Image: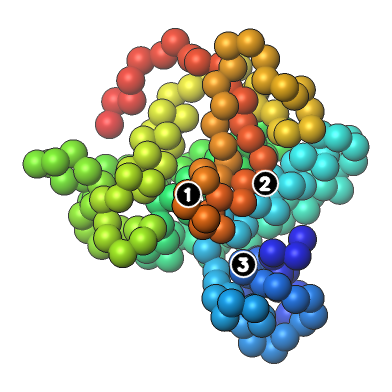
Amino acid sequence: MQEHFLVTRQGEGLPVGLYWGQVGSVGCPTGPPPSPNGRADKHSYNQGYPIAIDVLFYRITGDTKFLANAARTAAAALDYWSGDTLWQDAPAFNSIFFRDLLALDLVAPSPAYRKALDAYLDEVWKRARNPRTGLFDQGGIGHYGPVAGNYLDQASLVELFALTQWPRQALERVTFVGRDWPPRPGASIIPMAPRTGGSDVGQASSLALLPAPSVSHPTY
């Protein structure tokens, strides 16, 4: 994956097993990896992409080594992106990460994935929600772009709240481009990475195709 760099040794600015984003060259630098635009960065969504790709390879090949790879990335990411580190990353980035964790959970279940998502959303509701406007822009929550409360972060959080209420039989219909494409009649298309004005966030690695569920609204 050219746009991601896997950390394989200590002293590179991220724990071993995680991925840098915005990387335009290969190699094993001793510091943050080089990037043509000078914007090598680290975000939760940089971990979601490799997880989704490994799940995709598993679905295509049936080779469980890809599930092992995805589980290792997920474990390393959940260890690093927790507490303030997760809180200060943009919800738009975190939503990609958690959606890809849900995709992994369908083929290699772990209670840690749902637990992390529920804990994050509980904190969002308690700390970030503005009771006057209903926007999630309080408590120093991270944001995509210059200000909190932007539409992309708000939409991403609404999506995550909704996905927690979808029944498992609906989530089990998650699929990726390359399998079961074009979409089934009546399916809802949810991009794993929403496209926004030329941003790298728009480089979607996959799509989730989910039928509309008939469940109650979240009880937050």
Mark 3 packing: few (<14 Cα in 10 Å), some, or many (20+)?
many
Give the mark nearest the N terminus, 1 or 3. Answer: 3
Q: Is residue 117 left or right of residue 56?
A: left
Residue 174 position by quadrant:
top right
- Amino acid type at circle 2 is Ser
Q: Is residue 55 left or right of residue 112?
A: right
Residue at 36 percent of width and 48 percent of height: 153
Of the residues tagged 2 and 1, which is closer to the observer? 1
Give the mark nearest the N terminus, 2 or 1. Answer: 1
Instruction: Name the element at disc 1.
Output: loop
Whether pointer 2 and pointer 3 mark residues with C-beta atoms closer than 8 Å, the reply is no
Residue 219 lies, with reference to residue 63, above or below; the image says above
Instruction: Name the element at disc 2.
Output: loop
| Disc 1 to disc 3, C-alpha distance | 17 Å
Q: Which residue is mark 1?
A: 196
Residue projecting furthest to the bottom: 30
Q: Is residue 195 left or right of residue 130?
A: right
Question: What is the x, y in percent for residue 5?
Answer: 71, 69
- Amino acid type at circle 3 is Gly
